[in-house]
Amino acid sequence: MPPSEAAKKAAKKAAKKAVKKGAKKSAHHHEGPRHEGKDLRRAYEHLGRLRAMESLLASGAAAQIKLLTELAEVSLQAEDAKSAADLLRAGEHLAFGTLAIKAAERKLSEALEAVLHAEYEHLVDKAAEHWERHAGERPEELEYVYASMAASAETAYQNGAYRRALEFARGVEALAHVRGGGAMRLEEGEPAKKPKRLKG
């Protein structure tokens, strides 16, 4: 067999093996006690960072983070550590976004601006796709926080405040992974008040 043919055959075999391995890995990605432990650890770490920042936050952001924290506690009670971790991750990005500068960032290279634009578009598109896929499964107050953070991300992006925009966009993407369903309710028959909307 010519060397080129042997190389092609070996590459094809390796690709098949990688696909099989990837499929097997993804099938078990969200299963088992190991993954649940990872989500619990993530929730713990995100909450710690939020607690460290809470005194620095304005009232509007603080109210939204309080809501996300309460929903995360409800998720943990329902043994949904993944949703809890994603809610707290969203809160963390919301906090960092609020603390980031509002002014346009100057003197960025064309290469950096290009990758920042690409990342922002990727996050927003990914968030919209996941959010629509599970539309109607989340409580109304969470939908409000999602819409508020998405609007803040777009305002910051249009103003050239890219660090702020990317933090809000990452928060929106995190919220899009939360499903919640019927288990995620703060008080049965008593919906939470809508928190103040973020500015810019």
Image (cartoon, rainbow, N blue to C red):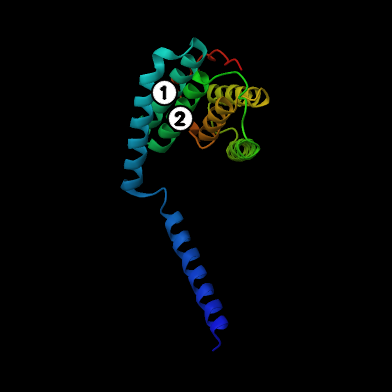
User: What secondary structure is found at the residue carrying circle 2?
Assistant: helix
Characterize the local packing of mark 2: few (<14), some (14-19) or many (20 or more) Cα atoms within 10 angstroms: many
In the rendering, which numbered label is found on residue 69? 1
Splitting the image into 4 quarters, where does residue 106 fall?
A: top right
At which x and y percent is residue 120? 61, 35
Q: How many marks?
A: 2
Q: Measuring from the top left, give residue 21's x and y in whole percent.
A: 44, 63
Residue nearer the viewer, 112 or 116:
112
**Residue at (62% x, 37% y) in the render:** 132
Badge 1 marks a residue whose secondary structure is helix
Tell me residue 116's x, y (percent). Answer: 60, 36
- Quarter of image, res 49: top left
The three-letter amino acid code for the residue at tag 2 is Leu
Judge whether 77 appears above or below 11 on screen.
above
Dot placed on the residue nearer the N-terminal end, 2 or 1: 1
User: Cα distance, mark 2 to mark 1?
Assistant: 7 Å
**x%, y% of residue 100?**
52, 21
Which residue has dot 2 on it? 87
196 vs 6: above or below = above
Cβ–Cβ under 8 Å for marks 2 and 1 = yes
